[in-house]
Amino acid sequence: MTVLCILIFVLFGIIVIDAQKPSDDHYASIKADVQEDADHGTTAVAEEHAVAKTEAHAEKAVAKKEKAVAKKAVAHKKEAHKPAPQKETKALPAGKTEVSDVIMMENPAYAKHKKGIVNFTHKAHIEDYELACGECHHDAKGKPLTLKMGDPVQNCIACHTKPSKKTKDAKTKSQKLEFHAEALHMNCIGCHKDYNKKNGTKAAPAGCGNCHPKK
């Protein structure tokens, strides 16, 4: 009887212990949870690496762009300080005169110019207004000269030697033409007035302010 009771007690203990022992399903569940945690950890690490890599690429791109901008700025600064290329000047053939399209009527013989300097549109008078060279250029007797562009010519003051307007003492035309300013005004204004009268217009300037710009 005692032995039977002992056997029953031992058997009952085994059953209880076996009941408390985790089942295979429980072990599987625990293993799945551990694996899920591991996978989650791996994913988080991967995401962190991806974010860090993206940020590194962005920083590198910004640095590259800043470097390019700085390089361009340096190049622009160098170009701005680069001396302008010198225009090649060729010597004129002997006996030729260089003629500008626009000539500033500023003669060094005058100590001071009271009015603004006239910009004489030489090319326009020849090509657009179709004036002959002899309209302005003449010999000592006032006879028009037959010239070609670039032919040697003298400055007006070479013959009209007095750098000023006529004085009250200048009575005759020849006396008046000794004065440089008088000779220029007689030639230019006289031509303009004749043109306006002939064509019934006021297109050709005939007043001081029309030719002399304000200072």
Image (cartoon, grey):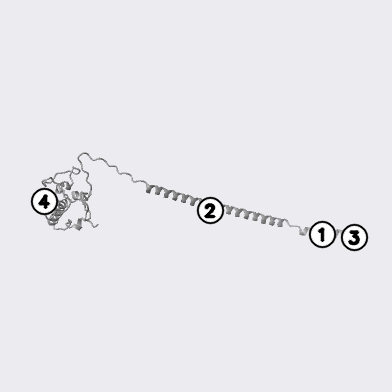
User: Where is mark 2, residue-wise?
Assistant: 55
Mark nearest the camera among 4 and 3 is: 4
Nearer-N-terminus badge (1/4): 1
Label 1, label 3: how many angstroms apart (C-alpha)? 17 Å
Label 4, label 2: how many angstroms apart (C-alpha)? 92 Å
Q: Amino acid at mark 2?
A: Glu
User: Where is mark 1, residue-wise?
Assistant: 13
* Mark 1 in CB contact with mark 2 (< 8 angstroms): no
User: Where is mark 3, residue-wise?
Assistant: 2
Q: Amino acid at mark 1?
A: Gly
Mark nearest the camera among 1 and 4 is: 4
Q: Secondary structure at mark 2?
A: helix
Q: Position of residue 73 (x, y in %)?
A: 42, 50
Within-10-Å neighbours for mark 1: few <14, some 14–19, many 20+: few
Mark nearest the camera among 1 and 2 is: 2
Label 1, label 2: how many angstroms apart (C-alpha)? 63 Å
Frontmost residue, 173 versus 210 = 173
Q: Amino acid at mark 4?
A: Gln
User: Where is mark 4, residue-wise?
Assistant: 175
| x 10%, y 52%: residue | 173
Q: Position of residue 3 (x, y in %)?
A: 89, 58
Nearer-N-terminus badge (1/3): 3
